[in-house]
Amino acid sequence: MATKLFSDPIVKRAERTSLSMVERASAVPAPELRFYIEDQHDLVGQSQQDLFNAEGEAKARKPSAKAAGLATAADAQRQRLADHARIIVARQERLERAESVLSPLTTRSSHSTFKYWATIIALLFGDVAGLTGAALSSGESPYIAFMQSLAVAAATIAVGNSIGTYFKHILEARKREKARLTAQEEEFSPLFDGSHGPMTLLMIIGAIAILLIVVGIGGLRMMANNQVTGIVFGAFAGAVALGSMFNAFHHACEVSDKLDKYETAYARARREERRILRRGPIYKQAKLASISESIRTQAQLEGAGAHAWAKVGGFETLINNPGLAGHGRRYEEGSPEPVVPAPRSDQSTAPSDQRSR
């Protein structure tokens, strides 16, 4: 175990020391030899430094071993991150290319999404309320009435939404159609060929679905109330389907959907990267390596301090024996010149050789 030599005899001695004014002073330089006591204190200091380093290495052994044990898993995670980084770069570049080519062709406003979903919710709640009331009037149980109303309302909105979206896509595709595409547009050629699936089939299916909904709701109201009420509520159901269709037509934009798809894919890749990094082997290995390095650095600094204090002890011994060890080392070439105090006024007439001593 390393022994810390951080005591304060030098500080206490310095506090008790006072400097007296003298008429003249002389000093004896240290002899041209190195005392055994100096070698002894140097060896003690070096041993202290080695002991501190050994103690630090012992403390750092456990976290270092754990960090080494994570090396294989950390390397695998780094490889996975490197592979995933290529996916991120590819998706980012694709998104940038798509934005540069397709952004001028978007027709969806920045607030369109909020308006779209607000309208969908309003239509859904209104249709569910009307259908539930009609079902309850016919003697249906509340739970079944609500569930059937929710399903029919969702079907009504879905039909209108599909027709409106598809119709808008066809119109925009015809506007974007080009005979020749630039090199940048070739990557997104399906958006410029003007082709889409059969509109007639969708219109027929949508018309049949809306007709069934209108007839069903109207008939339900006729049974519960009267013929006029049935016609009115059947018209309401048709209005909900048409409202859903026009809401979807206003919001739909195939180009914006494509850009949103690319942006979502890029954001998903970024989230996956953060998930891989979160508390994985790389993080744990780096943390353990940092702890080990900090322990070793602290031990080295403490050892250097103990070494210095051991040398201070050797100098203390020399200072206490000036008759044998002298008062200090000679100034060597290149060392700063000693500071010679200016003579006092009452010594101005003293010989120059005495003042320079």
Image: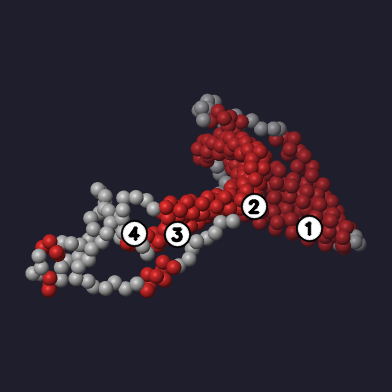
Q: Disc 4 designates what residue?
A: 324
Give the structural element (helix, strand or loop) at label 4.
helix
Q: CA distance from mark 3 to mark 2?
A: 78 Å
Q: Quadrant of the C terminus?
A: bottom left
Mark 4 vs mark 1, foreground winner is 4
Give the structural element (helix, strand or loop) at label 3.
helix
- Disc sitting over residue 128 in the figure: 1
Q: Quadrant of the N terminus?
A: bottom right
Q: Position of residue 32 (x, y in %)?
A: 31, 50
Q: In the rendered view, would you say 21 is above or below 297?
A: below
Residue type, numbered disc 1:
Val
Q: Disc 2 designates what residue?
A: 116
Q: CA distance from mark 3 to mark 1?
A: 87 Å
Residue type, numbered disc 2:
Tyr
- Front-most of residues 96 and 47: 47
- Disc sitting over residue 309 in the figure: 3
Q: Earlier in the sequence, mark 3 or mark 4?
A: 3
Residue type, numbered disc 4:
Leu
Mark 3 vs mark 1, foreground winner is 3
